[in-house]
Amino acid sequence: MSAQILDGKQLAAALREEIRRDVEELRAKRGIVPGLAVLLVGDDPASQSYVRGKQKASTEVGIHSVVERLPADLSEQTLLERIDHYNEDPSIHGILVQLPLPPQIAEDRVITRISPGKDVDGFHPWNVGRLYSGGEGFVPCTPAGILEMIRRNRIEIAGAHAVVVGRSGIVGKPVAQLLLRENATVTICHSKTKDLGFYTKQADILVAAVGRPGLITADMIKPGAVVIDVGINRVDGRLVGDVDFEAVKERAGWITPVPGGVGPMTITMLLYNTLWSAKRMGNVQ
Ligand SMILES: NC(=O)C1=CN([C@@H]2O[C@H](COP(=O)(O)OP(=O)(O)OC[C@H]3O[C@@H](n4cnc5c(N)ncnc54)[C@H](OP(=O)(O)O)[C@@H]3O)[C@@H](O)[C@H]2O)C=CC1
Ligand SMILES: Nc1nc(=O)c2c([nH]1)NC[C@@H]1CN(c3ccc(C(=O)N[C@@H](CCC(=O)O)C(=O)O)cc3)C=[N+]21
Ligand SMILES: [Mg+2]
């Protein structure tokens, strides 16, 4: 038996159509066009390519997007001033600073400078805190996209044992928190975990967010499990995840492909967060 494919590309297309209609309605009824500012520092080719993807997707749904490309050697102060500019610009409802940043710039000071009400990545400590305390705030795009993909395919989360491999602030920790909120029993693994397979073999839902091609092999999977592959790795010019897809799909119940799985959902949730921010304009800090 081969796993069912969790088709992120197809679901993303359907959701983007819903977002496009909502954007049009917001424009027609209230005269508001959602605006997104993306700040890209340096010329890393992968970051350039993600930013192009975000810009194209925004345009397709009618979101006005501004991409500001800044030199790799700019000072932290200059970047903070650009953030202040968009914080004060009423035509901008979402601000995203593409990560990673060059070494002379402190990521936490940059993220904290973004107005929490425009923090569509959900990385500001206020939004992080709201995710953990259960309040209303921006949910990080990749974790939100993963949950949406699970829900829309009617996969049961409550009572499932979810094992998350990776504990970054942008994927691992927030996805674990969202799964916990949906009543999964959650285990988080990381680079110091001893005997990773011991944990992954118990997973009804397995999320791999590491960045190591081939880390998750078929022998590490519980038969019938839902396998979510967040990893994006370039191997011999090809894009692959963290999961040995060909072997694991023969054992799993559901699996996300790379490309075409979590990636397109991440961008879709960015559009969703920007729309939501524009709808709430004036109602939130
Ligand atoms: N599809 C999408 O939309 C997105 C994809 N990505 C991709 O997802 C992957 C993860 O991204 P991100 O979370 O930012 O990465 P980070 O590098 O920030 O975090 C990687 C995590 O993996 C853990 N880890 C490293 N090696 C192992 C190992 N051998 N066994 C178990 N855990 C390990 C690390 O542990 P420790 O904490 O101990 O160091 C860390 O917690 C990358 O490939 C990235 O490109 C990221 C964002 C969005
Ligand atoms: N502030 C910030 N927010 C982010 O959300 C953020 C970031 N910085 N830095 C980098 C990571 C990575 N990330 C991806 C988004 C889309 C795809 C994506 O669309 N992937 C396509 C393939 C794209 C391709 O072909 O290269 C897919 O998986 O099908 C991948 C990865 C967002 N990130
Ligand atoms: Mg994201």
Image (spheres, helix red, strand yellow):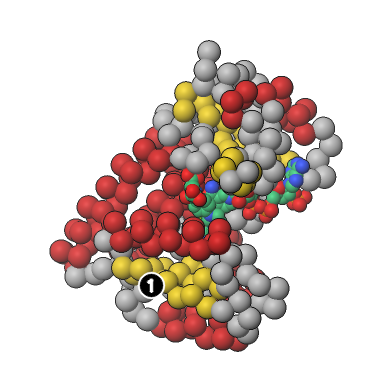
Q: Residue furthest top?
A: 1
Query: Could you say where residue 187 lies in the image, as x and y percent from the top left?
Result: 69, 37
Whether residue 142 is visible: no
Residue 114 in the figure: left or right of residue 66 = right
> Mark 1 Cα within 10 Å, few/some/many (few <14, many 20+)?
some
Q: Residue furthest front?
A: 236
The residue nearer to you, when weighing 217 against 87, is 217
Residue found at x 43% / y 61%: 52
**157 versus 122 height, above or below:** above
Q: Residue furthest left?
A: 28
Residue found at x 44% / y 79%: 87
Q: Quadrant of residue 247?
A: top right
Residue 154 in the figure: left or right of residue 234 = left
Mark 1 and ligand 2: say if the CB distance to the nearest ligand atom is below 8 Å: no
Query: Could you say where residue 55 lies in the image, as x and y percent from the top left?
Result: 38, 62
Q: Which residue is mark 1?
A: 66
Whether residue 136 is visible: yes
Residue type marked 1: Val
The residue nearer to you, when weighing 191 against 70, is 70
Residue found at x 49% / y 82%: 82
Residue found at x 66% / y 72%: 102
